[in-house]
Amino acid sequence: MSVASLLAAIALNAALAHSPRTIPAEFAKHPAASTLRGKSHALLLDTAEKRRFRTMLRTESAEGANFNGHYRVASWGCGTNCIEWAVVDLAKGKVWMAPEAAHSCWVPEAPDDPEITDWFEMYEGSSLLYLYTCRDRENDRTFDSRSVYEWSEGELRLIRVDQVRSLRADATLRNDP
């Protein structure tokens, strides 16, 4: 292999490694807001709750956008199988705090489910967010429900809750009305 061919192969691999993830169809139907241009805005910590979590919010925000163009979904532990979370507008500094913590179930014998990532599924190119949680502590899975949200007018709007019913790779979901 020539040096030029080797360099071309390395450049192609580097470009593929840094290319954005492909957005699944449902996420693509909910396009993102504009991307952040320039530096992030200082956080507006205007409530006691936001000030209490200021270190986590600032640390997460420093990582940059991971949702809806110029937003960051930030999360941190609040005990066993529990996370607190927020959505940070990096362009304006506004912080939206989740109304309650999210919980998973501890199921040490449950196999990994490739259909469920871990707590969140979101894309920088979409305003849609999935939050995986556990509602039935007597089930045989770590996560048994998926809340589907859309970021709209400064807050998350719940679209639906899907109940995860299967451990198979082709997991079936049932919509709760």
Image (cartoon, rainbow, N blue to C red):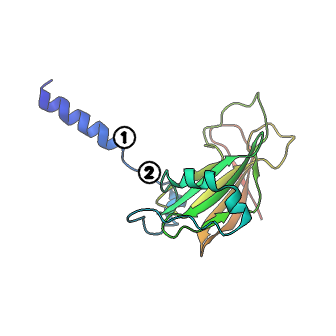
Q: Nearer the viewer, mark 1 or mark 2?
A: 1
Percent of width and height locating residue 93: 54, 67
Percent of width and height locating residue 104: 76, 44
Determine the image quadrant of residue 160.
Answer: bottom right
Amino acid on which the number 2 mark rests in the picture: Thr
Q: In the depicted view, which residue is nearer to us: 68 or 62?
A: 62
Give the secondary structure at mark 2.
Answer: loop
Percent of width and height locating residue 174: 73, 54
Give the residue at x 81% y 50%. Answer: 135
Give the residue at x 63% y 43%. Answer: 118
In the picture, measured across the screen, residue 55 lies left or right of residue 164, that is left
In the picture, measured across the screen, residue 39 lies left or right of residue 80, that is left
**Which of marks 2 and 1 precedes in the sequence?**
1
Residue for badge 2: 22
When the figure is inspected, residue 9 is found, relative to residue 55, above or below; the finding is above
Percent of width and height locating residue 13: 30, 37
- Mark 1, other Cα within 10 Å: few <14 / some 14–19 / many ≥20: few
- Residue most extreme to the bottom: 153
> Looking at the rendered structure, which numbered label has been put on residue 96?
none
Q: In the depicted view, which residue is nearer to us: 42 or 13?
A: 42
Whether pointer 1 and pointer 2 mark residues with C-beta atoms closer than 8 Å, the reply is no
CA distance separating discs 1 and 2: 12 Å
In the picture, measured across the screen, residue 40 lies left or right of residue 49, that is left
Amino acid on which the number 1 mark rests in the picture: Ala
> Looking at the rendered structure, which numbered label has been put on residue 17?
1
- Mark 2, other Cα within 10 Å: few <14 / some 14–19 / many ≥20: few
Give the secondary structure at mark 1.
Answer: helix
Q: In the depicted view, which residue is nearer to us: 125 or 113?
A: 125
Give the residue at x 61% y 43%. Answer: 117
Number of numbered discs on residues: 2
